[in-house]
Image: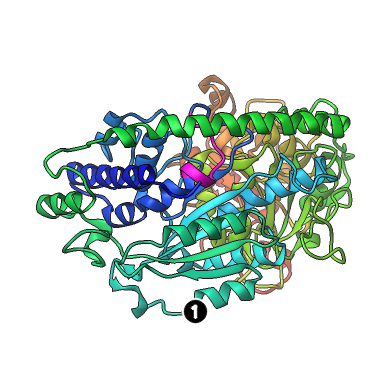
Amino acid sequence: MPFSLEDQITANTAAGLALDAVEAAGHGHPGTAVALAPVAQLLFAHHLKHDPKDPLWQGRDRFILSCGHASMLLYAQLHLSGYELSLQDIQQFRKTDSLTPGHPEYGHTPGVEMTTGPLGQGLATSVGMAWAQLNLAARFDPKAPSSPLRSHIYVIASDGDLQEGVTSEAASFAGLHAISNLTVIYDDNQISIDGDARASFDEDVVARYLAYGWNSLKIDQLPDGSIDINSLDQALIAARTSEKPTLIVLRTAIAFPSPNMTGLAATHGSPMGEAEVAKTKSALGLNPELFFQIPAQAAANSERIAKIASQHRAMYDQEMQKYAEREPELSKQYSALWNLDLSEIELPKFDLGSSIATRKASQQVLEALAGIDQIVGGSADLSESNGVAVKALPVYHGSSAKFGDVAGRRILFGIREHAMAAFNNGVALSSPLRPFGATFLIFADYMRPSIRLACLMNLPVTWVFSHDSVGLGEDGPTHQPVEHLWSLRAIPNISVVRPADANETAAAWLEILKRQGPAALVLTRQNLPTIAENPAVEKGAYAIFEPKTAPKVIVIATGSEVQIAVTAAGALAEENIAIRVISAPCLEWFDSQPQAYKNSLLEGAPKIAIEAGSTIGWWKYVGATGTVLGIDGYGASATPASLFSKFGITVGNLITEVKKLV
């Protein structure tokens, strides 16, 4: 059905709501919300398969507003489509505790599929969302060319989104793998906060995305400056059946049809003022004297969409019934994905005294976890080094059978750390799959914006970071993380887990999956002795060495430094100096324990912390009178043993510091 007069009236009403909401708040981004209102209406009323009465409907398509600053574009459309977002909520735009915050927030506002605002994140994350749908269809409905498991992802992106490097990484990956259920509408309004965007961004975007392997086309404005909505409609129809991802470069004028401010950068991030708002409302066919007005034709929009949603759901239910008949066993496995069952998993048990790097132990654990259908993931070109080259996980490739297949679960991300992190966020957002992404700990900095968003949305994503300290040796200070552990720990809502040995690594994987939140698993390159028989990893910290008498000093250690502490405690015991050694694989989990448990470990003696990294956060645990052995500078190119000696991360130095405290 073509874009109708009722659609245009609804779009104009949405633009009016955006104008009034920004004006009432006194701040916001009206220009894009006004100009793109017809685009949002076209998507929600004619292309997006969704149900406003059930925002979490399993069969839905997903819409991502990558330029999250234009949040009123989304909020107005959600309200007019019938989502549980009232006119009062619109009137409370950007107010304290409202359902309409300045940028869309996942889990806060019905109909918002992800938290957006940091530019580039929405587009990059959508690649993972789209991949998850294709992968589920390939794995659980392989014979159907048009499976009901395969939904579509729509994105509206801005100049800023396409300028951010993360979208280049993600678009390259999407084109290579023909992630075809992804359509991006690029709002080419040639405006940025600094003015004319062409001063800093004037490349042939269509050609660039064609080179990535996308369908890429451009739609110009109509002579009056409005959006060519009919050409956009046809492009969206074609994109639905494409064998490639699609980029639609849509030429627009920011703030159109404002009489005096169309095309001005001032409308990007500031209210347009009462006088211009009134004139723009008149140009939209709205009463300039009414605020937050909804004409009858626009009010009826939710009823129209409800009827369409009912039809979509009926068709989906029929297709799912046919699917169950076509694939009785696979359909049962697909349904079971929403219930993560860890009861049948037998993790490897490592013998005390054996020696293995925790990255290698992690790979053995992953071989066992591969029996869980939800597990997917890969590495940024470091699969063997990171310990994620899991033989039990078939390799994925969307375009070439030479490198893998569409039903694969191990992903070769290439050297695209940031896109890998955003991709995994998308997988977690749009499916029951449990993704992991791996690289060296030093490159966590390349991923930080996406890691932060995962924590903000509380997504069950696991990052596997190997080569965790100066223990990686001769690669030198460029590859030796020192500040990274505390840099990650500083992010709210993350679990940073640095196991001491192979058995702690196995327990850590299991606990991460049970907790279903964002986690960073930090692993060694070098071999470590197996010293933990029944590690209480779930408590975050526990006594791995308890003296026979009351301890005179308490030593807290993580990762490879736990063995140093245990060895020192044994030597000191021979001198009748009683030491308790606490292995603290995850300080976040330890902090959440009852105070009585924390006191039982930490009270009664002075404390020393030892960790081959920055000391900055350890004073919280050792107190002003305690001691921290760490590394507050950069590493060097040398053997691991010589580096640990150089920086005092040794048994001898720990013994010396203990005796000072005693």
> In the image, what residue occupies the spot 50% across and 38% down?
621
Residue 519 covered by magenta stretch: no
| Amino acid beneath label 1 | Asp
Q: Nearer the viewer, residue 257 or 171?
A: 257
- At 58% from the left and 55% from the top, the residue drawn is 237
User: Tell me, what colour scheme is on the image?
Assistant: rainbow
Picture coordinates of residue 64, whole percent (x, y): 49, 49
Q: Element under label 1?
A: loop
On screen, residue 632 versus residue 384, left or right, reads left
Q: Is residue 28 above or below residue 403?
A: above
Give the percent coordinates (x, y) of residue 415. Answer: 67, 68
Is 175 located above or below residue 629 in the figure?
below
| Residue marked by disc 1 | 204
Q: Which residues are magenta?
A: 44-52
Q: Nearer the viewer, residue 88 or 68?
A: 88
Q: Position of residue 576 (x, y in %)?
A: 70, 35
For residue 118, side relative to residue 90 (left or right): right
**Percent position (x, y) of residue 651?**
70, 52
Q: Residue 621 or 87: which is nearer the viewer?
A: 87
